[in-house]
């Protein structure tokens, strides 16, 4: 009674950067949001289920490595944001935690192109489309080991326990300090996203509708 149909991905919008124009777009976005170091990128609203607090704690716990990076949190401040802001109030690295707020749609690919790694620490997600968007842009993906995220990422993501600050920090350190791991995640990501197209979504949806119609005709 249940058929799973995956979302698609806009492969023209989310792709590898190409040429001077894309390089300029990336530099412009960095300048706009005062991104001056290599950075980790989270994309999504700031709300409890997204586990932004857990990500901040993990980033802050990375010691000297955290000083080499910035954490960019790209998305609107939704609700219970006060808890997140109080989390960073006394941190020595608080100036390296950047909240973009709502950003323009065209800024998302450049934000992804410039990131050393994309991280999605959510306790749960309905699907996890940002994983595919990041992977298609050639950005190594780190994710919570929640079922929907692991299913979408496949071998293209390296996962952690979202309830453990230590697990998140350890995984981020692995990606940030291991160039070989970054290359493998990038390669696997570019392969993984080929499975997700809006054409396939439409075809699979049509197949479900046809199957239902055929069964109804047989019963009648």
Image (tube, rainbow, N blue to C red):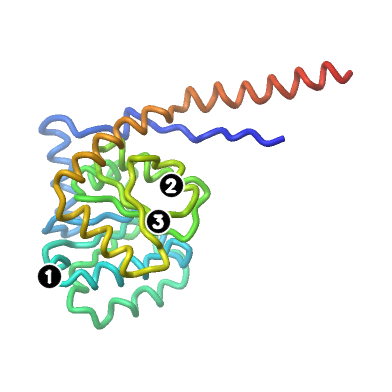
The residue that appears at 65% across and 25% down in the rendered structure is 208
Tell which of 37 and 172 is nearer to you.
Answer: 172
Up the image or down, 82 lies above or below 69; here it is: below
Residue tagged by mark 1?
64
Q: Measuring from the top left, give residue 207's x and y in whole percent.
A: 63, 21
Dot placed on the residue nearer the N-terminal end, 1 or 2: 1
The residue that appears at 33% across and 77% down in the rendered structure is 87
Q: Choose top left, top right, bottom left or bottom right for residue 46.
A: bottom left
Up the image or down, 211 lies above or below 21; here it is: above
Contact check, label 3 and label 2, Cβ < 8 Å: no
Disc number for residue 144: 3
Residue tagged by mark 2?
150
Task: Give the side of residue 98 with respect to residue 79, left or right.
Answer: left
Neighbours of disc 1 within 10 Å: few (<14), some (14-19), many (20+)? few
Badge 1 element: helix
Tell which of 145 and 86 is nearer to you.
Answer: 145
Dot placed on the residue nearer the N-terminal end, 3 or 2: 3
Dot placed on the residue nearer the N-terminal end, 1 or 3: 1
């Amino acid at each position: 009674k249940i058929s799973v149909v995956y979302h698609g991905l806009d492969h023209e919008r989310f792709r590898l950067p190409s040429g001077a124009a894309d390089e300029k777009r990336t530099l412009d976005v960095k300048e706009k949001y005062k991104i001056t170091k290599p950075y980790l990128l989270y994309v999504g609203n700031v709300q409890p289920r997204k586990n932004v607090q857990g990500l901040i704690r993990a980033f802050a716990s990375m010691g000297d490595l955290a000083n080499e990076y910035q954490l960019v949190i790209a998305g609107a401040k939704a609700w219970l944001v006060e808890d997140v802001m109080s989390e960073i109030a006394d941190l020595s690295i608080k100036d390296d935690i950047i909240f973009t707020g709502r950003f323009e749609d065209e800024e998302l690919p450049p934000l992804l192109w410039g990131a050393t790694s994309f991280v999605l620490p959510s306790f749960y997600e309905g699907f996890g489309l940002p994983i595919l968007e990041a992977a298609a842009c050639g950005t190594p993906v780190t994710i919570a080991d929640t079922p929907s995220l692991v299913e979408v990422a496949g071998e293209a993501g390296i996962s952690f326990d979202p309830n453990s600050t230590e697990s998140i920090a350890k995984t981020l350190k692995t990606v940030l300090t291991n160039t070989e791991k970054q290359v493998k995640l990038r390669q696997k990501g570019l392969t993984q996203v080929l499975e997700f197209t809006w054409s396939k979504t439409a075809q699979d949806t049509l197949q479900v509708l046809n199957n239902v119609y055929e069964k109804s005709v047989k019963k009648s």
